Image: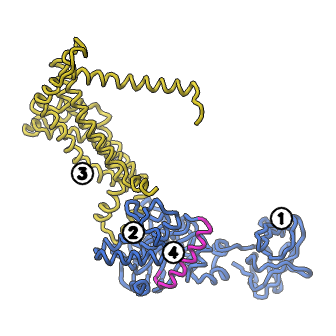
Chain colours: A yellow, B blue
Amino acid sequence: MRRRGPIFLAQLVFTLFVCAFLVVPVILSMLAGLTVNYFVGIQSGLTLRWVGEVWSGYRDTIFLSIGIALACLACTLVLGVPTAYVLARRQNALARALEELLVMPVAVPGLATALALIVTYGAVGGFRTSWVFILVGHVLFTLPFMVRSVLAVLMAIDLKSLEEGAASLGASFRQRFFHIVLPNCRSGILAGALMVVTLSMGEFNMTWLLHTPFNKTLPVGLADAYASLRLEIASAYTLVFFLVIIPLLVALQVLSQPPRTKSRAKQE
Amino acid sequence: MTAISEGAKSISIALQRCAKTFKDGTRALEPLDLAIDAGETVVFLGPSGCGKTTTLRIIAGLEAPDTGGKVLFDGADVTSLSIEKRNVGMVFQSYALFPNMGVTGNIGYGLKVRRRPRAEIAARVSEMLAMMRIEPLADRSIDQLSGGQRQRVALARALAVQPSALLMDEPLTALDAKLRDSLRLEIDQLLRRLGITTIYVTHDQAEAMALGDRIVVMEHGRVAQVGRPREIYQRPATRFVAEFIGNMNRLNGSVREGAFLTGAGCIPWPDAPADATEVFFRPEDVTLAETASHINGSIVGAFFLGDRTRLFVHVGEARPLVMETSTRRNFQRGEAVSLNIDPRGLMAL
């Protein structure tokens, strides 16, 4: 191995510094949720009392968030994958314009989108107060991430030839879509799913306007806790958020590993 | 192994007034009439953009001909039938193998779609693997295959469903020269053995000459000539065909008393048309002369090719004359040479 010069050391120190800059607040925040009294400090002892209080008080927000994230994922899969397929197959100006238009809800501030939804559908009582209202906002916001990531994969493979090959072998459109298109954009679908679930779980901007007191999502509950409760409870809430989101992300990441690399590793 | 020779019945294919105009108004194919016999191998040959691939895609059902054009399979009109109902086998330049399935999955896909019993699929797949001599690759995934192996799998996949015609779109173009030669021979033997109606698209004239029972030479969306390889080579119908297939020499001059007069000499030409101002002939009709010769020139280039030497001879025209010789002589640039030209090879186009 080559000897590492002073430049390498400088880079290492800088990288570690940046990491610490980002990670230390997270750790402190989580620790705060576990200390008996934050103002006294860690010497006051560690406790799970605050986590327990969050669990009893905000359990519903956690389940609602997970529910919305999964429903959002289902919607973006059903809407986004076919959309990406159509965009990939039609390489004309209209398709490009549509692709740009889809990204609008990401570019427009979430508050503006939420306001537009409220202005338009606010009067529809049952809809306004149901969790589906939040879901609609989340789908609008996350759909482009699904479409883009699937589209990127579809553009990288020779989709047209693959489909023509399958058609020449007698496969109907349906068979081609399920046997050829979907399996070959698997990595894009999983990457998109990862984005959609994370974004939906963490979405605050839009949800803050769309929610009602009876359906708060986790981030809205978090804001609530920060604003009105003891710092320890708010921090414990952050801790709970991490406990929910990290296993979810790890699971999705593992899923998105292409199975091929595994089998190849076995052979070598 | 009997199933291979049985196969599906080969069909005749006919194109009637098939033209293709793309949405942007460009005419890819002028109205084309062509009849292909059952079991025949027809090669569409031409430079890129000549309409050969469009014609293949019309036969396959991937493109529809302009209104009025018809595609007939064994006399039955299939123009409105989509590709999945035409029972044609296709081989693509890019192979188009499904990366999500392995070798076995790819070869068996057409039968799976046809809902054949699993045992039958397995039997047919191993039969195809044996035919293409790729049994050891059965369990590989597609990205573990070389280009030549991929094309073998693609051929096996196309033939596994016993198609009534085999359509190949530049199948060897992506391979290196040596592999191309050996696969070409193998494809030739395979097609003869199967007796399947085959349409083969290529821009490589050597490939066309080797594989085609007949060659359809195309230029700018039009058929320039249809004929057996020997006819096309020896009696090209147009200047384009003459110069696209093989090497062709051209000299300017005029006809006088059964001979063609050029600046470099006089070539005997008994059956010359009186008004010819140009004469065409192949490099192999030119020989080095020791004494009395037709024309004289000087060597501007000599490429030693091992078994022969290719000479470029300046004879007073912009383009040097090309010829080949297998003598062991060493040629120098600027050396004066005398040449004879076989009158049987002379053409006016």
In the rendered structure, are the residues bearing label 4 and label 1 in contact, judged by CB atoms less than 8 Å apart?
no
Judged by depth in the image, the label closer to the viewer, 3 or 1, is 3
In the rendered structure, are the residues bearing label 2 and label 4 in contact, judged by CB atoms less than 8 Å apart?
no
Give how far apart the Cα atoms at labels 3 and 2 are. Answer: 31 Å
Query: Same chain for marks 3 and 4?
Result: no
Q: What is the chain letter for disc 3?
A: A
Magenta part of the protein: which range? B176-197
Check disc 3 and report the residue beneath it: A78
A134 sits to left or right of B52 = left
Density class for disc 3 (Cα within 10 Å; few <14, some 14-19, many ≥20) is few
Check disc 2 and report the residue beneath it: B104
Give how far apart the Cα atoms at labels 3 and 1 are. Answer: 69 Å
**Nearest to the observer: residue B53 or residue A61:** A61
The quadrant of the rendering that contains the N terminus of chain B is bottom left
Check disc 4 and report the residue beneath it: B200
Q: Residue furthest right?
A: B291
Compared with residue A29, is residue B185 higher up or lower down, i.e. above or below?
below
Check disc 1 and report the residue beneath it: B300
**Residue B49: where, in percent of width, then height?**
54, 65
Q: Residue furthest left?
A: A125
